[in-house]
Each structure stands twice: as structure tokens, then as C-alpha cells.
Image (cartoon, grey):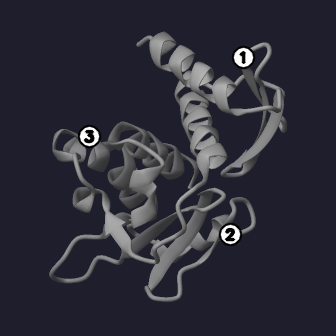
């Protein structure tokens, strides 16, 4: 799948806003260098170019950061509760929720082993959960429930309501998939 059109538009949008030509941004467990002159985004820990879908997320985030990120609302929403997600719900579950259930369903507290590797902390309002700082001011809450005699293991992701003013539906789905993959 080609991301060329989306990448070019994202670079153009950022170039129109940024006086800086070299920017650093933290995304999950990595820091990326964004070179606006050469239109390159490099992982600073691995010295490899960001994948196209990661680059688009970073560019969209930086564009909104330069415009002014919305404040966190403190209101957590599931993906299904976000506006305009109707066509993405099944794919979202397959790419984001089911991998977490497969990995941690039998051992939900195992998710806490990632606390030192990812920018996250244990969620206080749940039995097994973590809040991950995907980007600065873009938290993702992951909750897990252990299987019992009546119900299978389950998981879900929650986003601060403000995410809808930073990312489009497709970006949120991609972000959730990356978070699930890194857990």
C-alpha cells in the first residue's frame, strides 16, 4: 500500500508551520529525529527510517502540536465511542484488542512487565491496566479482564476524548495497532 500522497501532504502541512528544520519527538519507547529539509524521519535509538504509517502519525502529531494541542479532557472513550469509526470497528478489534487478549488473556498482570520499557504506568482504576503515553499529551489506557467461569478474557483500549482533535479515525486505529504490537 502506498502512503505517498498522505506523506507528501503531511510534510507540506508541517513545513508550512514549523520554523525549525530539525525536530525531535518521543513516540512510545523511541525518539525520532524529523528532518524537514530532507523529509526524513529516523529512529534515534535504531538509526533506521520510520515506517510510512509511523511517519504519518508523527507528522500529524507534530502539525497539531505546532497549532496547539487540545488539553486532556480526562474523559476516556473506547474506539467505538469515537465519531466516524463505523467502518473501522472490526479491523480495530482484530489489530489492537485481540493481540492483547492472546498475549495477556491468561495472565493479565503480565502487562505490567512493560512498565520499565514503555512510557507507561499502572492504571489505578482497574484490576489490570496501564496508561501509555503514546505521544506527549496522547495517553492510551489499556484494560484487561481475566477469564472466569462465565466470561472469556477480555481487553479494551480507551483514549482521552481530546484525541479526536489530534488524529483522524484511521490514525487512531493505526496508533492503537502500534501500541498493541509494542506491549
The residue that label 1 is drawn on is 39
**Quadrant where the N terminus lies?**
top left
Q: Count the labels in the image.
A: 3
Q: CA distance from mark 1 to mark 2?
A: 33 Å
In the picture shown, does residue 141 fall above or below 123? above
**Could you tell me which secondary element the residue under label 3 belongs to?**
helix
Marks 3 and 1: which is nearer the front? 1
The residue that label 2 is drawn on is 115
- Which label sits on residue 167? none
x and y percent of residue 80 in the render?
A: 23, 57
**Could you tell me which secondary element the residue under label 2 belongs to?**
loop
x and y percent of residue 116 in the render?
A: 75, 67
* Residue 46 is at least partly visible in this image: no
Q: Quadrant of residue 101?
A: bottom left
**Are dots 2 and 3 in contact, CB under 8 Å?**
no
**Quadrant where the C terminus lies?**
bottom right
Local packing at callout 3 (Cα closer than 10 Å; few below 14, some 14-19, many 20+) is few
Q: Is residue 179 left or right of residue 149?
A: right
Tell me which residue sits at (83%, 32%) in the image. 20
**Are dots 1 and 2 in contact, CB under 8 Å?**
no
x and y percent of residue 150 in the render?
A: 15, 81
- Which label sits on residue 91? 3
**Quick one: 82 or 102, which is closer to the camera?**
82
In the picture shown, does residue 80 fall above or below 31? below
Amino acid at each position: 500500500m502506498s502512503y505517498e500522497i498522505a506523506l507528501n501532504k503531511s510534510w507540506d502541512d508541517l513545513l508550512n508551520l514549523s520554523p525549525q528544520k530539525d525536530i525531535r519527538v518521543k513516540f512510545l519507547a523511541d525518539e525520532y529525529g524529523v528532518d524537514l529539509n530532507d523529509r526524513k524521519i529516523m529512529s534515534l535509538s535504531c538509526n533506521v527510517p520510520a515506517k510510512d504509517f509511523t511517519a504519518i502519525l508523527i507528522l500529524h502529531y507534530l502539525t497539531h502540536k505546532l497549532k496547539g494541542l487540545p488539553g486532556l479532557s480526562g474523559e476516556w472513550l473506547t474506539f467505538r465511542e469515537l465519531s466516524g469509526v463505523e467502518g473501522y470497528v472490526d479491523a480495530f478489534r482484530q489489530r489492537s484488542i485481540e493481540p492483547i487478549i492472546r498475549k495477556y488473556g491468561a495472565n493479565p498482570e503480565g502487562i505490567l512487565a512493560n512498565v520499565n520499557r514503555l512510557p507507561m504506568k499502572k492504571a489505578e482504576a482497574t484490576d489490570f491496566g496501564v496508561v501509555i503515553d503514546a505521544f506527549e499529551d496522547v495517553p492510551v489506557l489499556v484494560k484487561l479482564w481475566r477469564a472466569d467461569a462465565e466470561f472469556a478474557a477480555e481487553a479494551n483500549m480507551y483514549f482521552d476524548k481530546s484525541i479526536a482533535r489530534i488524529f483522524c479515525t484511521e490514525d487512531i486505529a493505526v496508533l492503537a495497532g502500534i501500541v498493541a504490537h509494542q506491549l
